[in-house]
Amino acid sequence: MHDLNRALDKAAAGDRLDRNDALSMLHQADLLTLGELADARRRALNPDPVVTFVVDRNINYTNICMSGCRFCAFFRGVNHPDGYVISEADLHQKIQETIDLGGTQILLQGGIHPELGLDYYTGLLEFIHAHFDIHVHGFSPPEIAFLARKENLTPEDTLRALIDAGLNSIPGGGAEILVDAVRQQVSPNKATAEEWLAVMRTAHRLGLRSSATMMFGHVEQPEDIIRHLMRIRELQDETGGFTAFIPWTFQPDNTRIPAVKRTAAEYLRVLALSRIVLDNVDHLQASWVTQGDKIAQVALAFGADDLGSTMIEENVVAAAGVTFRLPQSEMERLIQDAGYRAVQRDCFYNRLKEVFL
Amino acid sequence: MDTLFIDDNFHKIYEKVTAGKRLGFEDGLALYQSTDLTGLGRLADTVRRRRHGNTAFYVYNQHLNYTNVCLNRCRFCAYARDRAEEGAFTLSLADVRERLLERIEEPIRELHIVGGLNPALPFEYYPDLLRTVKEIRPQAAIKAFTAVEIDHMAGISGLSLEATIGALKDAGLEMIPGGGAEVLDDRIREALFPRKINGERWLEVMAALHRAGLTANATLLYGHIETLEERVRHLIRLRELQDETGGFSAFIPLAFHPGNTELSHLPPTTGFDDLKTVAVARLMLDNFDHIKAYWVMIGEKLAQVALSFGADDLDGTIVEEKITHMAGAQSPKGLAREEMERMIRAAGFRPVERDSFYRPVNEEKGEGIPAHA
């Protein structure tokens, strides 16, 4: 086994970990050690005693999806009676409500709907910007990769068209685990690891920034988690386009993967390791949606410096039977209780509004 | 890798802890006031591992709440009812028998029995209850009646406190749960539970129980109107009695659940506060063997993480918990043995099923390597 102490010393010195260092830490380091190292790294990268969050809403423009990922409880097949494509009236109302609640952005994601073409997407973006001054964080790489194929365009041309129509940034969803052997098992019809990375690379090159995610706790091995982190870190070295990394645990209820739900300690271990390994990604988000408010707050001592979104609306995790709620005022209280100042941010982590309780 | 502390105060405390020196009031307060959560965890974990290595205990138990009728009507309680109020209940001995027989196939090692102060129950009810339980479950230990209930029984038995305890012991009482301590402070008592015995009396009853050879747990109800100073003083009072008697086994911090109580305007405790309270207790209560992370109160996720913050026990598998769930607790009502063990292993600890007195039962040989690191 690779020498754990050598890996820990490297981490404590702020040196970059290689794959074997990271793997031995994931296998052997205890929870508190990972937490201490992650907390130190977090304070070095973000020295201000601030924890940020964004006020936004998840809007799923459709739940019809041809990917049929086995971990998903949200999607409906093409002719399913519960399938929908959002109406302009509903979209308008949801965005108006978001703005009324102090929201600054919407997270706009599907479904990969086989019949929706580029015109639909550019139309959606133009409609939103014609009516509202709001940031659109939309369309994960699998949606963009699919759209490019459908339209017989390169991902670059597709992204250019979306940017021209008003796309402001893209979410890091659909990454799952960036190892094709794992993707074959859990999301065989979705973009490959290379495709996901290629869309991100192109987007970053075109000036469109994004987050990156990882969903773990299904069929992957510890090695796959490390491979995922390394791939994100390599691309970030190349482009610098990732704003934040967001790991979360697979929620198995109502899905077709019979996994046992990962525990809080396992989540915190992976979160902390992500902070230590991803030395070139500025921000790390805690996932209160999957972990609940108590562990999300504790995550602030295990490397996270951001609580993500207040999520005025969330549908995908809720479909898997998990419905934690976290009102903005409560989020602010938790941040202050953890010893930080609560600051509302925009998608690029610019600070908008400091909250004084 | 050296121990990293973000909080500079912790170096001095760490020296005391590694030298086995007792921490004072100021140390306790400094620990509580710090936001260096992993540093605090490291301090507490140092003590925890010295005592218990990587063992984490749990017990296969059953809860029995014999009545919710209660004279005290504490303001933080969502469980109690007046006699004629809707939802009031009292178990007859036949009911008790039935509850126990419902789960008679399960390998239950401990019965945790607590209730309210129901004026309609004569003293004989309590020894009869114990004898009924012992008859049906001779192998399980009976942990029953908080110091508050024992004081009430002494008041109605016509006997001295010592003789009351003697009668209960003769009927099968083996251990005392730690409830009813709340915060051992008169200011808090006046504000929240003026009809309940005060801290002085709670400690007096505990001392008498210890003298009678009964071990007991101790608790702190935190997260309502108490200050950090009051919490630390509470711990010190428990520590002082423990120095005298040695009768306490485990300390159990109880997170206040405001739902359905007169204090429902208060927010729930945070994850930081829950973990800090476990850790500060482990560090201050240097003469207590065990610190319990009671998953019913703080949720199974926090309880699991608390194993790295000084806790060595997750309490029971419990199927029917009423008191906290009536105050809106979101935790499941029971955890299966398999889940309990998986949770412990996934946190890097070795699960050991125990009896009431922390003697291992069915010990397995796992090494506490995470099931999935």
Image (tube, coloured by chain):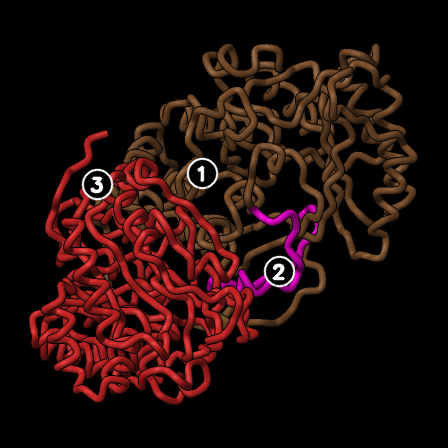
Chain colours: A red, B brown
Which residue corresponds to mark 2?
A: B352
Q: State whether discs 3 and 2 lie on one chain.
A: no
Q: Position of residue A212 (x, y in %)?
A: 24, 69
Q: Nearer the viewer, residue B325 or A350?
A: A350
Identity, as a three-letter code, of the amino acid under mark 2: Val
Subunit bearing disc 1: B
Residue A78 marker: none
Q: Marks 2/1: CA distance?
A: 22 Å
Across and down, in percent, residue A345 comes to 17, 48
Q: Secondary structure at mark 1?
A: helix
Subunit of label 3 = A
What residue is rendered at 77% in x and 16% in y?
B83
Q: Is residue A300 visible?
A: no
Report whether B274 appears left or right of B214: left
Residue A276 percent coordinates (x, y): 23, 67
Q: Position of residue B236 (x, y in %)?
A: 45, 27
Report the residue marked by disc 1. Answer: B281
Front one among A242 and B151: A242
Is tag 2's residue or tag 1's residue first in the polypeptide sequence? 1
What span is in magenta?
Answer: B331-357
The label number, if any, that marks residue A342 in the structure image:
3
> Does residue B333 show up magenta in the picture?
yes
Residue B371 relative to residue A220: left or right: right
Q: Is residue A332 above or below residue A23?
A: above
Asked whether the residues under the numbered discs 3 and 1 touch, taking CB atoms below 8 Å apart as contact, a structural biologist would say no
Amino acid type for the residue under numbered disc 3: Ala
Estimate how packed mark 1 is, as few (under 14), some (14 to 19) or many (20 or more) residues with alpha carbons within 10 Å: many
